[in-house]
Each structure stands twice: as C-alpha cells, then as structure tokens.
C-alpha cells in the first residue's frame, strides 16, 4: 500500500514519516493488491488438458458438443491461436521450453535420441518451489519412455506426447544404450501414470481430484484414443477428446483443490489434416474463476504464448526461448 508522505516543517517529523513509509512498503497488509505480470493474475492450481491433431475449424458443435456447447460459453476462447509444427514432439517441447530442434520435428526418431540438457517449464517450477505432476494416461509405470498399448484395448501410451522425459534435468541419467539405469527420482515422483493400463483409465488422477491432494501445476496427457490421435473404433476421433474433457473437467471443478485462483487450459498439440495448408490454428480455451468469458479474436498466439502465460501466472523469473518474443495472452482476466 502506497502512502502519501506529509512533509512537515520539522526535520524530526519528516524522518519519522519516511521511516514509517519504508516500513509500510515492506509489510503490506493482507488485503493489498497482488501485482500482475502483463495483466495475468497469480495462479493457484493449473490444469492443462491436451488433445491431438485437430484443427480449430474442425471443433464444432457436432464433433465436440461439450467443448463448444459447455466449455466455450464459460471460457476465454481464442480464435487466433496456432500450433508450431506438424509433429507432436516439436509442439510439446516447444510449449514447455520455448524451442524445438529438427530431431523433435521428426516424430519417427526413436527415444531417447532427442533428449536435451536445457532449461524447461518443469525445471523453472522446481527452482521456484512450485509443485507439479505430468499425468500420463495408460503409462505403465512412472517415467516410462517406451510406447505401449493398442487401439482395441483403449490404452495407447506414446512417449513423444510426454515432454518431461526428454529433458535431462528431469529424466536424469537413463539414456545409456541399454537403458539399464533407473531414471532420476524427480521423474519417478512427478511423471506419473494417470491410472492403470486398463481401458481409458484415469483413476489415479481422479482419486487425487476427489481428495484435493494435487500439486499446483497439472499437465494432463490423455492416451492415444482419448486424445483423438487414433480412431479407436469411432468415426469421430475429435469426439473422444471431447468426451474426455466432459468427464474430467467437471471433476476438476468439483475438487476441493479447485479454488478461486485455479485455471483450466484446454488446447491441442497440432492441427489436423483437413485444414487449409496455411491454417495452423488449434483451439485454446482458458476457464476458471479468474477468467472473463468470451470469444477473443486477438493475437496471433502460439504455444510459445502458452508458455509465457504460465511463466507470468506462476511469476517465474525468466521467459524461456521464444516465449520472450511471443505475443502475451492478455485481456482475458476479470
């Protein structure tokens, strides 16, 4: 709280007033306004849900009734938000480190060829003492880095949709040729299965939602079916991610951990095959008590803007890579 200094004639009075003002500046009362970075309010808990391979123009009331009919009216819905590349790993690495390399752009590269010793969102959160978990549906064990599962069993886990294991300072030292070294403790404790390898199982995540025992940052990656990456017996893969959001978002909002400063972000890693060649837009929706709902035609934004948004919301000290030049996502807050 800033106070006006009343300049008194007496030098002694002025000294006392100045000392009082300095003390006040260091001991702000509980009701004082918290500074915002680029207009972004401080985030409490954040939940990010990511779908796969779906262009903005393909998310319609018919293909995605929950996202369009329920989430959109209560969210900030950005119409000018684009992915970075046509390869999944490049987008996941870009949105969590502000850069990606040619290796990341080639999803066919076997793990762990593309690992990097580079700062990233997860290590930024660590440095600030902010808790986080990356939740991976259908991953068989913590910090797993081999693809598993099948379409017919609805339990596809894909390593290159899991960015945390590509960072040396998270995954640790298991990049030996024979993979005969255990990952770092951090990876085993923070890169977790969201449930069992049963069909579309999010039971571990949902149990934590029910109890309220959750970290501040939750990066939620559905399996290959529920992300909409694979058809998995349906002619509407987009509807699979829509159904995932319709099931999980109400549980997030009902959780004791979901407070007045909680945020839900829904987006996709990359655009689909049906969009015009120059249209790389994907859905980006932000919901929660802090948000001013509406359709926002501002921008252009990219996954680097997403990273910058999180760095602002968590008051992280630096912008990583291209996030420093990305268009900030502003004007969507109450």
Image (cartoon, helix red, strand yellow):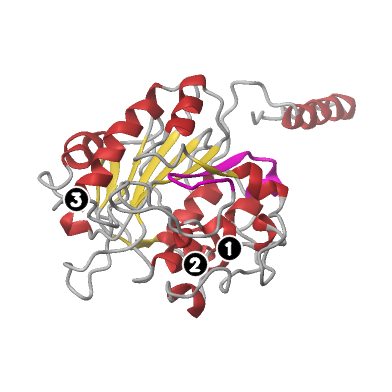
Tell me the distance, in whole angstroms, between the alpha carbons under discs 1 and 2. Answer: 24 Å
Question: Does 136 appear in magenta?
Answer: yes
Marks counted in the figure total 3
In the image: residue 267, left or right of residue 312: left
Q: Viewed as shown, does residue 219 lie left or right of 235?
A: right
Q: Earlier in the sequence, mark 3 or mark 2?
A: 3
Identify the element where label 2 is drawn: loop
Q: Is residue 228 magenta?
A: no
Residue in the image at 27% along x and 57% along y: 230
- Label 3 neighbour load within 10 Å: few <14, some 14-19, many 20+: few
Residue 49 visible in the snapshot: yes
Q: Which residue is mark 1?
A: 166
Which residue is more in the foreground, 210 or 307? Answer: 210
For residue 233, which numbered disc appears in the image? Answer: 3
Where does the magenta region start and end?
Answer: 125-142
Which quarter of the figure is the N terminus placed in? top right
Tell me residue 197's x, y (percent).
43, 42
Residue drawn at x 71%, y 52% is 184
Nearest to N terminus: mark 1 or mark 2: 1
Percent coordinates x, y for residue 26 in the rendering: 76, 31
Q: Is residue 143 left or right of residue 41?
A: right
Q: CA distance from mark 3 to mark 2?
A: 42 Å
Residue at image coords 23%, 41%: 67
Q: Secondary structure at mark 1?
A: helix
Q: Position of residue 35 (x, y in %)?
A: 57, 38
The residue singled out by tag 2 in the image is 325
Residue at (48% x, 65% y) in the render: 94
């Amino acid at each position: 709280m800033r106070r006006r200094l009343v300049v008194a004639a007496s030098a002694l009075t002025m000294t006392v007033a100045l000392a009082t003002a300095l003390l006040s500046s260091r001991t702000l009362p509980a009701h004082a306004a918290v500074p915002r970075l680029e207009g972004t309010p401080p985030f409490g808990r954040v939940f990010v849900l990511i779908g796969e391979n779906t262009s903005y123009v393909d998310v319609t009331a018919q293909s995605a009734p929950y996202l369009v009919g329920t989430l959109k009216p209560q969210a900030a819905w950005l119409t000018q938000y684009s992915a970075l590349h046509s390869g999944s790993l490049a987008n996941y690495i870009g949105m969590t480190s502000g850069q990606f390399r040619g290796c990341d752009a080639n999803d066919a590269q076997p793990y762990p060829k593309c690992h990097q010793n580079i700062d990233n969102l997860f290590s930024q959160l660590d440095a600030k003492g902010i808790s986080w978990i990356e939740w991976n549906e259908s991953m068989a064990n913590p910090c797993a880095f081999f693809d598993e599962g099948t379409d017919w069993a609805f339990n596809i886990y894909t390593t290159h949709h899991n960015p945390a294991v590509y960072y040396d300072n998270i995954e640790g030292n298991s990049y030996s040729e024979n993979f005969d070294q255990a990952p770092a403790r951090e990876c085993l404790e923070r890169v977790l299965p969201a449930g069992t390898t049963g069909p579309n199982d999010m039971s571990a995540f949902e149990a934590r939602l029910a109890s309220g025992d959750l970290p501040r940052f939750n990066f939620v990656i559905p399996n290959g079916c529920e992300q909409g990456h694979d058809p998995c017996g349906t002619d509407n893969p987009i509807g699979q991610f829509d159904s995932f959001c319709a099931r999980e978002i109400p549980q997030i909002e009902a959780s004791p951990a979901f407070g007045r400063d909680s945020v839900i972000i829904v987006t996709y890693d990359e655009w689909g095959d049906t969009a015009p060649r120059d249209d790389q837009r994907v859905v980006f929706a932000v919901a929660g008590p802090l948000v001013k709902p509406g359709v926002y035609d501002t921008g252009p934004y990219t996954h680097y803007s997403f990273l910058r948004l999180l760095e602002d919301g968590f008051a992280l000290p630096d912008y990583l890579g291209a996030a420093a030049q990305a268009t900030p996502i502003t004007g969507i807050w109450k």
